[in-house]
Image (spheres, helix red, strand yellow):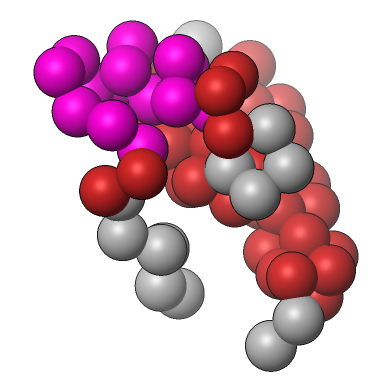
Amino acid sequence: MLYKDVLKYGYFQLQRAQKSYLDSCFTSKKIDLHLIKRFIEIQVILLVPICPHICDHVYQFLHPEKSIMNAKWPIP
């Protein structure tokens, strides 16, 4: 699979799913923070080839003392 396909189908569909989830949670005001953290983690891993330093910085907020360079590629 080409990286542009990963961005096209993985990243942007993930963005739509996240927006849909947040819109549905807006009325109930119950947001699962673990799920939001997982959204951010997957987005950062998908963007590593484009901007590795920024992604590593964000990843270390989620997982202190770990580097994104050792992170596993997300599987569906």
Residue 21 can be seen in this image: no
* Residue at horizontal 73 percent and vertical 42 percent from the top: 50
Q: Quadrant of residue 54?
A: top right
**Residue drawn at the location 41% of the way across and 63% of the way down:** 74
Q: Position of residue 52 (x, y in %)?
A: 58, 33
- Dominant secondary structure (helix, strand or loop) of the stretch shown in magenta: helix
Q: Is residue 1 above or below residue 75?
A: below
Q: Which residues are magenta?
A: 55-68
Instruction: Give the residue drawn at x 40%, y 72%.
Output: 75
Image quarter (top left, top right, bottom left or bottom right) of the C terminus: bottom left
Depth check, front residue: 2 or 29: 2
Q: Quadrant of residue 36?
A: top left
Measured as percent of width and height from the top left, residue 27 is found at 62, 17
Given the current orientation, which residue lies at the most extreme left position?
65
Q: Is residue 20 left or right of residue 71?
A: right
Q: Is residue 65 above or below residue 52?
A: above
58 in magenta: yes
Q: Quadrant of the N terminus?
A: bottom right
In this rendering, position of residue 72 left or right of residue 40: left
Left or right of 68 on screen, residue 16: right
Q: Position of residue 56 (x, y in %)?
A: 45, 25
Q: Is residue 38 magenta?
A: no
Towards the viewer: 25 or 47: 47
Against 43, residue 30 (above or below) is above
Choose top left, top right, bottom left or bottom right for residue 67.
top left
Q: Is residue 45 visible?
A: yes
Say if 36 sits above or below 70 in the image. above
